[in-house]
Amino acid sequence: MSRAVWPMPVSVEQIAVVVRRMSSEERLRLVELVPELKEALAPVRTLSQAKESARMLQEEMLEGLGGELLRADEAFLGGLVLEEYWNLPDRERARLWTEWAEEDWDTFEEVDVSLNTVPAG
Amino acid sequence: MSRSIRCLLDKFVARRRLEGLLKLAEGRDLTEEELWAIDLLQRAREQNIQLFVTGGTLNILRRLKVLPRYSTVIAAFLERTEGAQPTRYCKRWARRLRGFGFTREDAHILALASFGTSQRKNVLGMHFVATYDQPLINQWSLQHNKIEERLEVMRRDLRAPYDQVTLPHVLRPEEILPSGEDG
């Protein structure tokens, strides 16, 4: 059984402009009228799936670690042990990460790819 | 690898992923962001996604490699993951993106997602950028049409295959949906 396809009288971009001008109440009303929007915006994965992924990965890593977990006093980067690293505020951990990464956004080298390289898209 | 979906992890997602792996190896509980970053690896296995990180993340792994107890964590991090190499025109596109108000670092990440390649140099550009930076996601989304127009102007002057580069989707890790899935 085929479904009739109605041409869009306005573009998605035009609809987006209208939505941006709406108040919060109007946007909530829109979601009530178009419940499909909720489905489109829902996370692709559930948290329970993510927890299961973590559990499986932990099992695999434990095997690699010979069944022995890393210790809290295990030496880590920057002269810290793991426990000390976790005790730092997240902002400080981010700062250390930037320092350790030594990312170079100015003088990096660009490489060339061949004509038959597959572009994304 | 050329047919797989390609996803570039920004610095923050890469950090969450490594911290999540360290916590798993230590038996600690993970935060929600760490769980999603870890889940991306499982999804990469199941859905043929190739993950990429920046050179800075690789530098951190190199430092960590000196400590042998972390070899398992590093191996887990590098599964289906490699460093993205900037291609020709990456710097030029990053400069154009800065004109849209992106920070220096964000502009380079976004430019690398269009003008970046694998270690084998057999692909060009990424389909997704995974980030937890909501202001970046919003800014990208709001200015997307103008950025696309700017890229189109730049593409006209480029030779193949650079004249076919595209813009990535910029999303949170849990929202990334490889095309072709029903969802």
Image (cartoon, grey):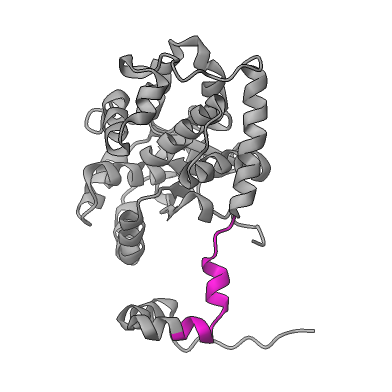
User: Can I make out residue B55 in this image?
Assistant: no
Q: Point out residue B20 in the picture as x, y percentages from the top left corner.
A: 49, 34
**Is A37 covered by the magenta stretch?**
yes
Looking at the image, residue B106 lies above or below residue B136: above
Residue at x-position 45% and y-position 41%: B8
Tell me where the magenta segment starts and ends, as one range: A29-45
- Which residue is outermost to the right? A1
Q: Give A107 or A17, whichever is nearer the viewer.
A: A17
Q: Is residue A95 left or right of residue B120?
A: left
Q: Is residue A11 above or below residue B52?
A: below
In depth, the one of A54 and B143 nearer the eye is A54
Give x and y (percent) for residue A86: 38, 29
Tell me the quarter of the image containing the N terminus of chain B.
top right
When asked about the image quadrant of residue B3, the answer is top right
Image position of B144 with respect to A51: above or below:
below
Magenta region, main secondary structure? helix
Residue B101: percent from left, percent from top: 20, 55
- Magenta-colored stretch includes residue A34: yes
* Left/right of residue B96 with respect to residue A46 in the rendered view: left
Q: Residue at x 30, y 53 (%)?
A: B154
Q: Using residue B72 as the reference point, say whether residue B56 is left or right of it.
A: left
Give the side of residue A5 with respect to residue B19, left or right: right
| Residue pictured at 44% horizontal, 81% vertical | A28
Which of the 4 image quadrants contains residue A79? top left
